[in-house]
Image (tube, rainbow, N blue to C red):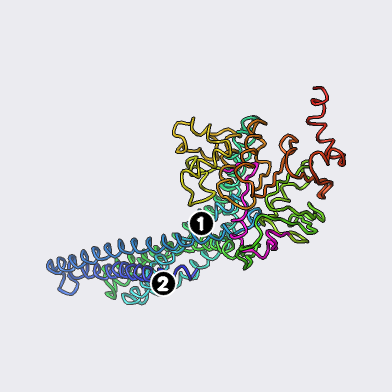
Amino acid sequence: MWKYVRRYLGLAILAAAFMFSEVLMDLLQPEIMSRIVDEGVLGVNHGGTGDLNLIWSLGLRMICLVLIGGLCGSLNNVFVHMSAQNIGNEMRKDVFRNIMTFSFQQMDQFGTGSLVTRVTNDITQVQNFVSLFIRGMIRTSMLMFGSMYFMFRLNTQFGLIVLCAFPFIVGCLVFCLSKANPLFSKLQEQLDRINSIMQEDVSGIRIIKACVREVYEKVRFGKANDDLIKTQLHVLTVFAFMNPVVNALMYVVVTIILLTGSYEVGAGVTTPGVIMAAITYTTQLLNGILGLTMLFQGISRGYASWKRVRELMSVRPQLRDGGFDGNTDIHGSIEFRNVSFAYPGSGKTVLKDISLTIQPGETVAVMGATGCGKSTLVNLIPRFYDVTSGTILVDGRDVRDYNLKALRSKIAIALQKSELFSQTIGENIIWGRADADDTAVERSAEIAQADGFIRKTPDGYQTMVAQGGTSLSGGQKQRVSIARAVIRDSEILIFDDSSSALDLKTEAELFSALKREKPGTTKIIVAQRIATVRHVDRIVVLENGTIAACGSHEALMNASRTYRDIYDSQMGKEEQHD
């Protein structure tokens, strides 16, 4: 944490200095009050005659101390918040920056809910930790040790009485904190769970309503929330027990001081003003101890959150950048050499010994049954995952040699699940290429067959898209996503079943426009429909993670039983009937 604190160390030191000054003003006042009572009111040193001038002068001095203390307290708050908020700001940006380098596997390991909690709530807890440490550590330590120091200055016997109570108070603090500390990490994990359920239910609200599962999700969320509250109440119960115990101990100390003081006043050893000051210092000491309790509670919770934040920061990307900048003589070639792949931790091989060469400008389709590895195959090209064995080459170079940015700049991909952002339609398209102008946006939309419906919307390309793209139909979202891929003007264009929501006429117009406008771009189409792929250069048929057949539509109709079965199930009977 030091690397963040040191950037704003000057602000933290100023905050600490003002807090020191504020507490010092508080500690000086009881001694002045004792002089007002003893000398100004009772006239202890003047034969019982009070001194009004002394009362005025000491009273004005106390008012000045209060004003100075108040000003120092306000400035302390300003500088504490400036340092803590800036530290949290830097930390949150660094954490998010690191998350953006995570592989899909690392994202899955943490989970969306946990990542959201760590970037928001956990870093807020760390900010509170910094604030408490700067403000609370100085205030509590000064109140405790300063009160003890001034107590001994007033009356050694009173100081010894308070000192004797210390072991019991510290023992109570240690016992309660030892019970509460393990619960703070558990609290954050339960908050992860709540955020995960919220994220799932908000994104899946349509299917929840369609399946009439609202009650089930209410119960699931309620159980997770009940677990959180149960743990929170456990923590609060521990501290609810501690506060009255500490208070009781301190009131016992006050009572003993009063009893001892009454005897000493009678014997002429001490004065009422000293007793009053001693009680005030005891109260300040009590406030310091209670502040220490809250300080330890906040620090314990903040440190538990810091460990979770630090875990995110310490994760290094699984996919290491190569040094190659992507400058090649070949543009758009892809080669799989004996590629096998298993998802990390699954132990199940999804692709087995795949060998395939795709020439620049070629259009290749990938077909097969659900779960045969089609999407996995294309996800290996932009290196979303690394192969388990074998090699994938793009433009004659191993994808692991590439700088990831250089590799992915060669590839544009449109997914089946269209991810749109809460921006305008035009801004969603321009995501594919930040420097694109309006003409390029409109041209890519025309190729994607999206221009027609976009111009019919109230604000055209400036129409805002609802969160998750819910304001658009499935086919409209897919066309916007395809336009976003097309505008990249990359050497390789991958469609991962991204036209499944389009009707056959629109889909045919899309691929016709792509063939006409981008003849030199290598295209890979993952599809389920024969009508989508029958006119491509080659069709790769996957079966159980291996290439069962590869060739044109006509060649596969003659040579591949698997392809012929797919054809018959979709189109054969209709064509025979015709």
Amino acid type at circle 2 is: Ile
Of residue 147 and residue 294, the one placed in the foreground of this image is: 294
Amino acid type at circle 1 is: Phe
Question: Label 1, on which residue?
Answer: 239
Establish if 240 lies above or below 268: above
Q: In which quarter of the image is residue 533?
A: top right
Q: Considering the numbered disc 1 on the image, is that residue within a helix, a strand or a loop?
A: helix
The picture places residue 464, in percent across and down from the top left corner, at 47, 38
The picture places residue 564, in percent across and down from the top left corner, at 84, 36
The picture places residue 113, in percent across and down from the top left corner, at 59, 49
Give the alpha-carbon distance from disc 2 to disc 1, as whole Å: 25 Å
Residue stretch in magenta: 392-419
Check residue 76 for magenta coloring: no
Q: In which quarter of the image is residue 225?
A: top right
Q: Is residue 231 left or right of residue 143?
A: right
Of residue 20 and residue 208, the one placed in the foreground of this image is: 208
Question: Label 2, on which residue?
Answer: 161
The picture places residue 99, in percent across and down from the top left corner, at 57, 58
Q: Considering the numbered disc 2 on the image, is that residue within a helix, a strand or a loop?
A: helix
Q: Which residue is drawn at 74% across and 57% down?
A: 335
Task: Answer yes or no: is residue 294 visible.
Answer: no
